[in-house]
Each structure stands twice: as structure tokens, then as C-alpha cells.
Amino acid sequence: MDALSGAGPRRARCSLGAASPGARAAAAPWARFSAWLECVCVVTFDLELGQALEKSSICYLSFPDSHSGCLGDTQFSFRIRQCSGQRSPWHAEDRHYNSGAPMSLQREPAHYFGYVYFRQVKDSSVKRGYFQKSLVLVSRLPFVRLFQALLSLIAPEYFSKPAPCLEAVCSEIDEWPAPVPGQTLNLPVMGVVLQVHIPSRVDKPEYSPPKPCSHENLLPAPVILSSVHELDLFRCFQPVLTHVQTLWELMLLGEPLVVLAPSPAVSSELVLALISCLQPLKFCCDYRPYFTIHDSEFKEFTTRTQAPPNVVLGVTNPFFIKTLQHWPHILRVGEPKMAGDLPKQVKLKKPSRLKTLDTKPGLYTAYSAHLHRDKALLKRLLKGLQKKKPWDTQTALLRRHLLELTQSFIIPLEHYMASLMPLQKNITAWKTPPQIRPFRQDDFLRSLEHAGPQLTCILKGDWLGLYRRFFKSPHFDGWYRQRHKEMAQKLEALHLEAICEAQNIETWMKDKSEVEVVDLVLKLREKLVQAQGHQLPVKEATLQRAQLYIETVIGSLPKDLQAVLCPP
């Protein structure tokens, strides 16, 4: 198939809709495009090539496997690890975006997201008897709702008018403003304006998008997306509503979980819904919304020589029941079916009941939940179904419940962590700042008696046991490292402010050696560089004062040292 934007034909029938990152570096016109997308791929099934495609994971992930039987149009997504030698360079734009974005929506440096629009229809002119083609958007942004909406506009048009349509769309995207957290943007494409809000870490958890921008008279009226990333949780969790709390615990503890679904659409949405359960806590484990036996990491994930990795794996091929039956938790769901007013629920089953052939829907696990089930939530959801409440109302109820559950669990950790920070009165200008005290798990567990989750959550159960298991999970490690980093930066910022507010720098320098004075200059410069790179939370006035101090200190030194510190 002919490739787009000058990329040569690919053996794997995967053609690029935009230049590669390396090519874009030399070609400035694609700079804005790369703020949103890495590339656009077109994947066509080729009967003659067959397994010649196996070296290209993207090609296999762009097609439902033969067990799915997807006819017509379907959308799904996948996540793939970048090759070690092809990691995207860490640009200043990435750092700027990530500094303002919620942890769960930051650009990923080591993974790509693939958003797929697949069409399979009968076509007698094709040797196989079916037209099979996928349009794929590859990005490092986890904006599933935005890119699904974009594909809904592009793909149907592309399948009827291939190359000119795609090239025009890529050019339009190259005119889009960069995604800036906290901003509401108008994104024109194919005669439609998509209006989106880019989430910010200062947004309230239950942020509602702003009203349309009044300063622009846009024609046509913009299509307002309520979210760039949030899925319809109620629809995704239909068959597992009675086990949502157990699944939340499994996600919190970073447990290995296989989701076997009837199609890539169900698989990918359920996996993404599961990892979103922990918001605002960042999901620190690996996850694959759609995974196939042809993936380059198949052997890594299916080996029995070591414990299963901390991965949530979405699959559709029943073969995985056999290869992954040693995994501790397997969730099999079927096509959504209604049982009265409530969608038919999967049952909790012991792993020993897992059959390699004809495995029935169920959550196969030996795990016992630490917390009691919230029966009131299920009653409210059922009542909402009986009253035929809109599904977005049901989703809002479910999302609020999971948010409050996560916050109730995290708040005691945050309070205890904050108590480890040195007091501001102990941070003085001319002394090394005091250290953050170590996190002692036993001290934290003792603090729960008077400052535990029971203050904000009515659920009973073994909270202590849940925290003990959480301490062994990748999520505790990820949370602690991030909070410790933020506290260390805050400590550096307070120390810089203390130095800048000191009125006696000349007095301090009188009895100091040149080595000590030069050391102060170097430390101030280091803090200044960190602050200017948005790594230290300091005010602009503090930065200006620090620069003035550096000039004052250097001016007091001999000319030869000044020349070394300030080369021409």
C-alpha cells in the first residue's frame, strides 16, 4: 500500500500518516502535530503475507483476532512498549505539560497508546471475501475519548477517500494549539470544531467542563466533549457491578489480572475502566487494554519460571485461559446480557474451577476482599435502572463512590506523610536544610486508630490488612516516591526563600572563605536552574532576588574567580 507523507511502503502494510519523530525534528511543520500524535497508521490485512506481519506488534494489535468475529465498524485501543532503542526524547514541552497535568494523564515516555477504528464488511472483489482495514492514531497521550471522537470523524471518510482525506486531516492537526493543562481548546477538523478541556492537576476531582467559549463566534457550533479521557464506567462495569469493590482492591494492590472479553472493544474499555478506579492515585503498574499472542512481550507475560508480572491484561483469545491459568486472578466476561433490571452479573469462582475449554463468565480468584461490600451503592444503582435514569447519572454515582473510596484510603497516608516534613521555623538561610523523616509503617498503622479512613468512609472491614498489603505493592512505592520528591522540592524552595529573605548576606560573607562563598554561588545557581525548570515551587520575586544575590556574592570575589564563575 502506498504510504503517506513520504514514508516508503511497509512490508507489514502499515503506512504512516505523518513523518516519524526524527523526521519531524528536521521538519518544523510537524512540531504541532507531534504535540498530539506520534503518527497515523493504516493497516490492511493481506492474505498472501499472513504471518509475515509477526514482527510488527502494531499491525496485530490493530485487528481483532479471529475469535472476536467483529463485523461492521468497531473501535478499541491498545498500549504498547516503545523499543528500547527508539524511546521518544524527553522534550521541554513534555516536562511543561506533565508539570500541570494530573498524574494519571501525563505523557508516557516509554509507551505508546494506539486508538483503532476497524472496519470489516463483505466485499466480493477481495480474495478473502471481506474488506478489512484499520485506521490507527498513535499517541503518548491517554486521551481515549478525544481520539475515539476524532476517529469517528476521520475513518468513515477515509475509507471512501483514502490519501487526500488523511493528508488534509494531518495538516489540520498540525495547526492545533498544544495541549495545555487547564485550558479549553477549539480543535477544527473536517469541518467540525471539537471543544475540549485539557485536565489540570488543580481541577477539582468532579470537574465539569466549562460552557462554550463566548469570545469566539464559532461556525459551525463546536462539538463539546465532556471529557478527553473518562469512559462510561457504568456501561463498562455492567457485568461486574457486584464485584466493583473487590476489583478496586485488586487494582489498588497492583495484582496481576487477566480480562478475557468477547471483543477488543469490551476488553480495552474494561481494562481502562479498571485502572481509572484509582484516580486520583496514579496507576503505577503495566496494563494492556488489548493484547495478542503475537505481541513481542507474549513470552515475558506467560512464562511460568517466575511470578506473574503486575499487569492488567485485556485479551480476547481463549488460548490465554490455558497459557495464563497460573495467574491469580482471571475475569471472564461475555456479551452484556440483562437479567431483569440489572445486567447479568458474573459470579465469584475459585481458580480450580477454571477450565481451559468453555470457561464460563466469572471472576476466578482466591482473593478475599478486605472491605465489606457497599450494599447501599448497589441498591442505588438498581433503583436508578428501575427509574430509567440516564447512564451518565449512573456513571457519576459510580465514579463518585470510587473516588471517595480512594480518597478515604489515601488521606491518612497524606496526613502522615505531611507530618514527616521538617517545620518551616527549622529551615534557616545559612544551614543545610533538615531531612525529611523516614516513613515508618508501624507508626502509620498506629495513627489509624484516631486518624484512619473511618473518619471519611462508612465501609467496615480490615483496613489495617489492606494497608499492610498496599505497602508491598508498586502503587505504594510509586506514591511514596512522588510525594517524597515533591516534599524534597518544597524543602529546597523554602530554603531558597529563607536565603533570599535574609538581610545580612554581606555580614555572612565577612568571615567565610572563598571556597564557602563559591559553594554558596553554585548551590544558589543549582536551585535557580531547578526553579526555572518548574521543578521548585517558588515565586518569580524569589527568583529575581536569588539572581541579585548571586551577582552580589560574585561581585565580592577576586577578579580571577569572577572570570571563572562568569566566563565571557
Image (cartoon, grey):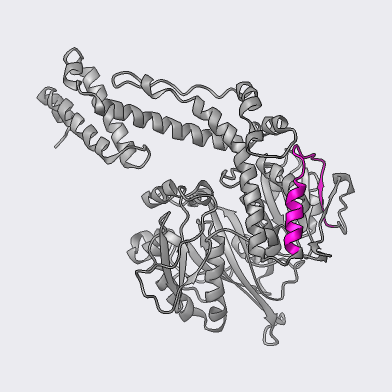
**Nearer-the-camera pick, 140 or 343:** 343
Classify 411 as above or below 282.
above
Left or right: where 368 falls relative to 25: right
Query: Left or right: where does residue 272 sit relative to residue 346?
Result: left
Give the percent coordinates (x, y) of residue 469: 69, 32
| Residue drawn at (52%, 66%) of the image | 225
- The question of residue 93 being in magenta is answered with no
Q: How many numbered markers are drawn?
A: 0
Task: Where is residue 253? Give x, y as percent.
Answer: 68, 39
Q: Which residues are magenta?
A: 361-385
* 365 in the magenta segment: yes
Left or right for 176, reference 372: left
Q: Where 565 falls versus 1 (above or below)? A: above
What residue lies at 38% left-to-right and 39% top-to-bottom? 535
In the image shown, does 194 or 169 lie closer to the viewer?
194
Question: Residue 133: x percent and y percent?
Answer: 62, 74
Point out the residue furthest to the top here.
511
Residue shown at the point (59%, 45%) measured from the top left: 283
Q: Which of the pair 19/461 is nearer the observer?
A: 461
Image-quadrant location for residue 191: bottom left
Q: Position of residue 188 (x, y in %)?
A: 42, 73
Residue at (15, 28) in percent of width and height? 552
Give the quadrant of residue 512. top left
Residue 56 appears anywhere in the view: no
Q: Residue 151: tell me if it is visible.
A: yes
Of residues 30 and 195, the one nearer the viewer is 195
